[in-house]
Image: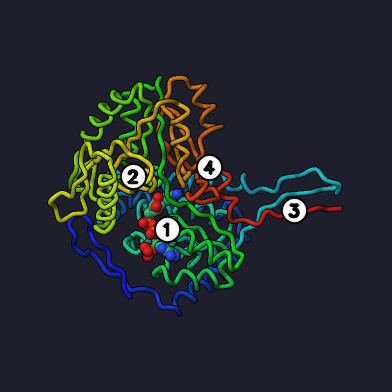
């Protein structure tokens, strides 16, 4: 079965790609395994030289790669360029930091000498989503390759062009052939790949059902997984918040990447004392968006990545409205062949509605009114997810304490929205997954932490 890339703005097929056969997949696994055994013995400097070249190639091809993303999944061109720059950053970050993160550490013991050493695991399978088609992959690949592993990528079916472009970057950089390889396969092939004895672990970024399926297969083989799944990030607007700042940051986070960001602000939990003023400012910010062609530099809100995803989102909105939510702006399907959806604000959102319970992966904001800070915290934590979160308050000390002690999430930013950054651990709790990417923790996920004692 082949893969089709369709431009979600024009609704036209732009390319088709042949799927790899089982024999080609097996050959790729064997090659990755063999290359890992070469690569694991190379010096950090050699690996770093390769990643620096990948970073250069990313920068040199920035416009073309951004355009490819725009065509395959509708991201605005400026968003695509920023994504490629960030990929170059993560490559350089790990090229420079990996050796320090993985140098054996001395430990106290009864032995004459004890070390904690870090050794690569082998071939790692990455199952990745379409929303940040380069960034999601590179934030796995850069640390995994620097640690001495090999990588196999099963990318989302609608971004096969991006998937191939990523493999090409590693080839162009002179990395050993097949050390990082894209497998054009459908998700039903993930089981046999993961069960292959040479594949030692998997990382998946995507939805909960996909994560649970991959975790179950990996569990049956006792192979390690890292899961970066969905979120329904709550942002608390407290009584002493700077409301203009809160409205601007909340709207920006909600609409980034046409609302298709796992760490996008999704639920806005606003205390009664400032509810009306926040909502007014928030609506104004949401309405400033320019919806349209993602190739046009003036566009700030392009199409969603696929029509089925847009329709699913609209159903969630309609169901929430039928259960009592009120749609303040948006909430309709525009007359356009593209997968467009307007900035939408739902108020009077309550438990039992998709807008409260589920992830809304598009430009729809759920606003929830609460009476107190204590109720705001309870509502924020009243979710199956626990990825990011935010607090807007001018009492920074108090907000810091709440962020550390009260909020159930993998990250909580005060007076800004959550952003991924190569230097900071990234990941979730509850149904948002487990494990951490980025920082020194990310590179230690796919290594054997080995204790060596010398008597
Ligand atoms: P998705 O449908 O779960 O797809 C993600 C990847 O998993 C794709 O490569 C997909 O392949 C594959 N897949 C789907 N079902 C599978 C299964 N049963 N077994 C093995 N692989 C399977 O998710 P999506 O719609 O692309 O992405 C949106 C979701 O990702 C949202 O929930 C979002 O929050 C989450 N996300 C999380 C993070 C994070 O860091 N926490 C970052 C970005 C996105 P096919 O395309 O071939 O189906």
Residue plotted at (54% across, 48% down): 436
- Observer-side mark, 4 or 2, equals 2
User: Could one spot residue 369 in this view of the protein?
Assistant: yes
For mark 3, what is the residue? Answer: 451
Q: Between residue 179 and residue 183, name the one nearer to us.
A: 183
Dot placed on the residue nearer the N-terminal end, 1 or 3: 1
- Observer-side mark, 2 or 3, equals 2
- Does dot 3 land on a helix, a strand or a loop? strand
Image coords of residue 142 (percent x, y): 50, 52
Residue most extreme to the front:
323
Q: Neighbour class for label 1 at 10 Å: few (<14), some, many (≥20)?
A: many
- Does dot 1 land on a helix, a strand or a loop? loop
Mark 1 and mark 3: Cα distance apart in space: 32 Å
Vertical side of 393 occupied by 297: above or below: below
For mark 2, what is the residue? Answer: 355
Would the CB of label 1 be found within 8 Å of ligand 1? yes
For mark 4, what is the residue? Answer: 425
Dot placed on the residue nearer the N-terminal end, 2 or 1: 1
- Does dot 2 land on a helix, a strand or a loop? helix
- Observer-side mark, 2 or 1, equals 2
- Asked if the residues shown at circle 4 and circle 1 are in contact, with their CB atoms under 8 angstroms apart, the answer is no
Report the disc number at residue 128: 1
């Amino acid at each position: 079965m082949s893969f089709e890339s369709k431009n979600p703005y024009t609704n036209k097929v732009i390319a088709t790609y042949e799927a790899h056969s089982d024999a080609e997949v097996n050959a790729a696994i064997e090659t990755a395994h063999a290359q890992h055994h070469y690569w694991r013995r190379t010096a950090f400097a050699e690996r770093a030289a390769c990643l620096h070249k990948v970073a250069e190639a990313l920068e040199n091809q920035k416009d073309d790669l951004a355009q490819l993303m725009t065509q395959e999944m509708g991201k605005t061109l400026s968003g695509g360029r920023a994504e490629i720059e960030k990929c170059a950053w993560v490559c350089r970050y790990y090229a420079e930091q990996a050796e320090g993160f993985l140098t054996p550490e001395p430990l106290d013991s009864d032995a004459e000498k004890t070390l904690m050493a870090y050794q690569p695991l082998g071939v790692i399978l990455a199952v990745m989503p379409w929303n940040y088609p380069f960034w999601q992959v590179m934030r796995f690949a850069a640390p995994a390759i620097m640690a001495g592993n090999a990588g196999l990528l099963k990318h989302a079916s609608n971004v096969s062009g991006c998937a191939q472009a990523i493999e090409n970057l590693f080839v162009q950089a002179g990395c050993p052939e097949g050390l990082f390889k894209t497998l054009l396969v459908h998700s039903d092939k993930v089981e046999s790949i993961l069960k292959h004895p040479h594949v030692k672990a998997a990382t998946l970024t995507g939805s909960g059902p996909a994560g649970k399926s991959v975790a179950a297969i990996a569990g049956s083989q006792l192979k390690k997984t890292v899961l970066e799944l969905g979120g329904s990030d709550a942002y608390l607007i407290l009584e002493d918040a700077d409301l203009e700042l809160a409205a601007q940051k909340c709207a920006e986070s909600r609409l980034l990447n046409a609302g298709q960001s796992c760490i996008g602000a999704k639920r806005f939990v606003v205390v009664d004392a400032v509810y009306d003023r926040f909502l007014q400012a928030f609506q104004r910010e949401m309405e400033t968006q320019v919806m349209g062609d993602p190739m046009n530099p003036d566009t700030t809100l392009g199409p969603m990545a696929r029509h089925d995803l847009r329709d699913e989102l609209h159903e969630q909105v309609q169901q929430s409205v039928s259960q009592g939510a009120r749609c303040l702006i948006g909430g309709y399907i525009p007359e356009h062949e593209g997968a467009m959806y307007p900035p939408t604000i739902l108020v009077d959102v309550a438990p039992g509605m998709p807008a409260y319970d589920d992830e809304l992966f598009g430009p729809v904001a759920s606003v929830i009114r609460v009476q107190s800070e204590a109720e705001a915290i309870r509502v924020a934590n009243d979710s199956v997810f626990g990825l990011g979160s935010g607090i807007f308050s001018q009492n920074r000390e108090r907000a810091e304490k709440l962020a550390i002690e009260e909020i159930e999430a993998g990250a909580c930013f005060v007076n800004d929205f959550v952003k991924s950054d190569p230097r900071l651990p990234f990941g979730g709790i509850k149904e948002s997954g487990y494990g951490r990417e980025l920082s020194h923790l990310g590179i230690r996920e796919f290594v054997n932490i080995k204790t060596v004692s010398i008597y």
